[in-house]
Each structure stands twice: as structure tokens, then as C-alpha cells.
Amino acid sequence: MVCQEEVLISKVCELYSEIASLESLKPCKNVDTLFTELVLTCIPPSPIDVTKLSKNLQEIRSNLIRLCGIAEGHLEHHYSAILGSYDNPLHHLHIFPYYKNYLKLALLEFTILSQHCGPQLPNKIAFVGSGPLPLTSIVLASNHLPSTTFHNYDIDSSANSSAMRLVSGDPDLSKRMAFHTNDILDVTSCLEEFDVVYLAALVGMDKEEKNRMIDHLSKYMAPGAVLMLRSAHGARAFLYPVVEPCDLRGFEVLSVFHPTDEVINSLVIAKQGLASMILPNKCSDEIQAFNHPLNHGNIIIEELTLDDQL
């Protein structure tokens, strides 16, 4: 009997081959169908450990993540342009097919922030890799953090131009949203100003790039500031890069959340500081032996204490 993991890998490889052969990843019926099938293949909870895949499968996974990133960028540009054609773009966000996922994700992230930041909600948040459709910033600002200012960083000037058009007509968000065209590795002392920094899932598409980003943020974020990262777990790691607690040199990892519903990304929350005491070679296998993941409905939560990481 063929094991479930082999079936999963075979299907992912089949879809990768079809996606890689496409001339364009811009939204169209064929592209949408293939990526929908890929997401539906990877969403169900799976015990697969992508770090243990063969070298060939690791290469396929890496290439697939990059293709997903390109397709996601095209999709966001496409819908940002449509939304920007309305007089009040923010009144039509529901036309984006994954808008409900962002509502759920923002609520989860706000809940996490409230638990770890206490009654003092953040005054300034930076979102790194905000893109042309900065839904996380928009939803958090509109629904959960009515007095917080959001500084959105993206390396693509066209993405920022598209994003600005979405909020420029709103009397509230236009005052609380700023957009910066920068490589975050070139942003230094400004990072000290933020209470919370978000790092988007596709900023740093492989481990080396991601770790370079994390090390840079560790160097320049203020002591006690919170880092929110998006990661992936199980088969979802074929769609997005994985951030392990041991990758967060310079940070105290507080919690790891693995949604098991249609919200794809895992969430990692960490605090700048106490990092010099954290051993960088202690990875997830060792940490999991110390803590007890709790299944809260559609979320698996791993609470990590400093003692667990030492």
C-alpha cells in the first residue's frame, strides 16, 4: 500500500511540472486552476518533514516556492488594479478571493499581539514585504488597531504605488499608512522606532535569504520589540518557506501557531532581546520535545519559554 506521504509528493511534483511549463503565471483560468489544486493538495494536515526530503525534491520545493511567489505577486497586482479603479477601493476588498483568509489571519495575529504585548497596543508597526495589496496592514488598521500607524516596506516601487492608491482616498488610513520603497537590508536605525515588525512569508524565499533578513532585524530592532513572522508547517511548506525557532538568532521565541484550516501560514512571534543566551543550533525537533502543542480547534499552539530554548 502506497503511503500517504508518497501520494502527496507525487501529486506536488506533478503539479510543479505543469506549473513550471506555463509561459506566464499571470491570473487566467489555467493558472488559477493549477494553483488552487496545489493549495488544496497542501492544506490538509500532514506529518511530512520537508527538511528530510531528497536533494532533488528539495530543489523542486525551492523552485515551487519561487513560482508561488511570482504567481502571488501577479495575483495581488491584478486585484489591486481592479480595486484601484473604484472610487472607494476599501469598500470592495471582498472581491479578492482570499480576503476572508486575511480577516481570519489578522484576527489571529491581533489576538497574539494582545496576549504578548499586554494592554499597551503598538503605536507603530512596520510590515516588510507589503506588496501591491497590503491587506494585513489594512485589516489590522481598520478592524483592530484604530490608532496605530503602519509603515509598509516593499522593494518594488510599482507595488507601493498600487498600494497607495487603495488607501489615498480614505480619510483615516491615508494618515496612518506610509509606504517606503526600500530593501529592508538598507533600513537600519529607523527600525528602532517600531513596536512590532512583520516579516512577510515570501520575503527571503530560501533559508539563507530569510536568515539574513532575521539577523538584520535583530541587529536594528529596539530591545523588547516584537517580530511577527509567517512560516509554514507540514505540506504547506511546499508553498512557503519555513522559519524554525532556531533561525531566530537575537530573539526570544514566544509562540508558534500552526493553523489547520484554510489559513495557510503558520505564525511565529518573537521578542528582540535575551537573544545572546539562545543557542542557535537548537532546532524544532529539540524544542518540541520540551513543549506540549495544544490543539485549539483549528490552531496548534506551541508555547516556548526561554528555558525551552536553552
Image (spheres, rainbow, N blue to C red):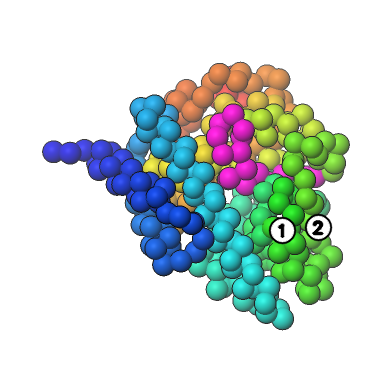
**Three-letter amino acid code at disc 1?**
Ser
Give the residue number, with chain letter if any, for mark 2: 178
Write down the quadrant of residue 222 in the picture. top right
Question: In what element is the residue under mark 1?
Answer: helix
Where 167 falls versus 118 (above or below)? below
| Residue closest to the eye, 188 or 176 | 188
Residue 256, x across and y down, in percent: 54, 39
**Three-letter amino acid code at disc 2?**
Ala
User: 186 left or right of 199?
Assistant: right
Q: Residue at x 58, y 45 (%)?
A: 202
Inspect this view and state whether residue 120 appears: no
Q: Residue at x 60, y 20 (%)?
A: 280
Inspect this view and state whether residue 277 appears: yes
Give the residue number, with chain letter if any, for mark 1: 158
Write down the quadrant of residue 116 in the picture. top right
Give the quadrant of the N terminus.
top left
Could you classify mark 2 by the number of other residues whose Cα lies within 10 Å: few (under 14), some (14-19), or many (20 or more)?
Answer: some
| Residue closest to the eye, 242 or 11 | 11
- Marks 2/1: CA distance? 15 Å
Q: Residue at x 71, y 58 (%)?
A: 158
Q: Which residues are magenta?
A: 194-210
Q: Does 205 appear in magenta? A: yes
Residue 18, x across and y down, in percent: 36, 51
Q: Residue at x 73, y 31 (%)?
A: 216
Could you classify mark 1 by the number of other residues whose Cα lies within 10 Å: few (under 14), some (14-19), or many (20 or more)?
Answer: some
Q: Is the residue under label 1 in contact with that under label 2 (CB below 8 Å)?
A: no
Where 274 falls versus 236 (above or below)? above
Mark closer to the observer (2, 1): 1
Q: Does 193 appear in magenta? A: no
Please identify the residue farthest to the front as the structure is shown: 23
